[in-house]
Image (cartoon, rainbow, N blue to C red):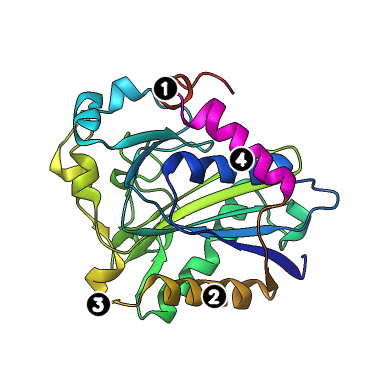
Amino acid sequence: MRDTWRLIVTSPLSGAENMAIDEALLRSFDPADSSPVLRLYSWDPPTLSLGRFQKAAEVLDLERCRADGVTVVRRVTGGGVIYHADELTYSLVCAPGQIPPAASIKDSFRLLTGFLLAFYRTLGLDVAYATDVVPEGTRLGERTAFCFAGRESFDILANGRKIGGNAQRRLKGVIFQHGSIPLINCATTGLAYMRDQDPVHAEGTASLDEFGVSMDRDGLFQELIAAFSGYFGVTLGNDTLSGREREDMIQLCSNRYLTDRWNLEGVGE
């Protein structure tokens, strides 16, 4: 386990900029000698993100997205559509040897979301992994077009309701993971941009304000940093993007995340 992680906190950015930074951090990471990274960020303006393998025209009402000026980006991770508005988001990049040992990829996902349980509990929420609290016989892991409609084994439930979503990507010797922490429940708003708008897809979701958490963004970031440091027993050192990371981010933003070819069609990886 690496004792010191880079901490990069960015101001609210567009979907294209956020996804370009995440991928730039992933691309620039050398598992042999790079320090692991925790990045905290948020979104402005509101953005819909597609999972890596989704087809935009099949799952989104693109005409409504255009009419309302809601941008669409594609993530490098899988999963369903997420509407990013009033939320905090984290991403992390590390090598397997920089975190405690995990028995499997699925176990590493449990391990790397553990700090979120600590964070929510600090705020007074009753949280647990879905696999630990859902009734016996409940089917977990079914694919859904809308992220919050599904239940994965290690989704986090607050009082039985899904709060946020997390996704992981593996490259050779590198783990990338990111996830959302909703301040306000925007599931119904996001669902309005889906082709399948069945209200049931937005049921069973939760956000911090629904549990009486009214702390501002900076205060929540500090609680999240403390939870991460305490859970993993590491120091987080304030940092910014390196020159190479910034160059990669600019190029990725221009050539990928601002193009329909990538965002809508998934072409260009």
What amino acid is at disc 3?
Answer: Gly
Is mark 3 in CB contact (under 8 Å) with mark 1?
no
| Lower sequence index among marks 4 and 2 | 2
Quadrant where the image shows the N terminus: bottom right
| Lower sequence index among marks 2 and 1 | 2
- Quadrant assignment, res 21: top right
| Lower sequence index among marks 3 and 1 | 3
Q: Badge 1: few (under 14), some or many (20 or more) residues near its Cα, within 10 Å?
A: some
Residue that label 3 marks: 212
Kind of element beneath mark 1? helix
Q: Position of residue 112 (x, y in %)?
A: 58, 59
Residue that label 4 marks: 249
- The residues bearing labels 3 and 4 have C-alpha atoms spaced at a distance of 37 Å
Res. 227 mark = 2
Residue that label 1 marks: 260
- The residues bearing labels 4 and 2 have C-alpha atoms spaced at a distance of 28 Å
Q: Is residue 257 magenta?
A: yes
Q: Nearer the viewer, residue 127 or 54?
A: 54
Q: Position of residue 124 (x, y in %)?
A: 36, 81
Q: Is residue 205 above or below residue 192?
A: below
**191 sits to left or right of 105:** left
The single residue placed furthest to the left in the displayed view is: 199
* Span colored in magenta: 243-260
Is mark 2 in CB contact (under 8 Å) with mark 1?
no
